[in-house]
Structure formats: structure tokens, C-alpha cells
Image (cartoon, rainbow, N blue to C red):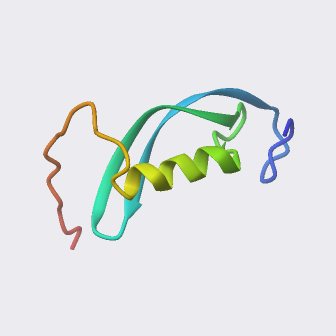
Amino acid sequence: MTICYFCKGKVKAGHVQHIHRWGNQVFILENVPAEICQQCGEVYFAPHVLAEMDKIALGKAQPQTTIQVPVYAFA
């Protein structure tokens, strides 16, 4: 992909930090390969990357570290 679906900006390969929710669990994935719009920041993941995220969420990988995250109600 070279053009953003939303803003028609230029898309370039890179790596991102991605917060992935699976049920009531939250995973922080670092250095995830992605295509990133240089204009609006929209992020696109290849199908094999999404499949790997699902494997991680299903517990098929050990985390490098674990952090505690507070949850707040806005109103």
C-alpha cells in the first residue's frame, strides 16, 4: 500500500507500538511492523502481523515484561 485509504496521504513502512485488547485483557506490543500514513497517522497491519497479534493474545508467547495499568471512568 502506498496511499492512505482515508486521507490519500503517502504511506511508508515502519514500526509502531500497538495496544491490543482481547476480551478484558490489554496487551502492549512494541516494534510492530506496519504501514503508517505520513499525513494523518493511520496505521495498517499486514494479515500475517494481525495473526501474530492474535497468537500473542491467546497466550502463545511470553511477555518481555509486565506492567500495572490503572483504569478510570471518565464520568
Name the residue rendered at 67%, 35% in the picture: 36
Left or right of 24? Residue 72 is left
Left or right of 44? Residue 74 is left
Pick the front one: 8 or 68: 68
Q: Quadrant of the C terminus?
A: bottom left
Picture layout, residue 7 above or below residue 33: below
Q: Quadrant of the N terminus?
A: top right
The image quadrant of residue 25 is bottom left
Query: How many numbered circles does the render carry?
Result: 0
The image quadrant of residue 9 is top right
Picture layout, residue 58 above or below residue 37: below
Name the residue rendered at 52%, 32% in the picture: 16
Name the residue rendered at 14%, 53% in the picture: 70
Q: Position of residue 40 (x, y in %)?
A: 68, 41
Residue at the outermost bottom position: 75
Q: Position of residue 12 (x, y in %)?
A: 75, 28
The image quadrant of residue 22 is bottom left
Picture layout, residue 6 above or below residue 40: below
Q: Position of residue 35 (x, y in %)?
A: 70, 36
Pick the front one: 12 or 7: 12
Q: Position of residue 67 (x, y in %)?
A: 17, 40
Residue at the outermost front position: 60
Picture layout, residue 38 above or below residue 6: above
Name the residue rendered at 39%, 55% in the picture: 57
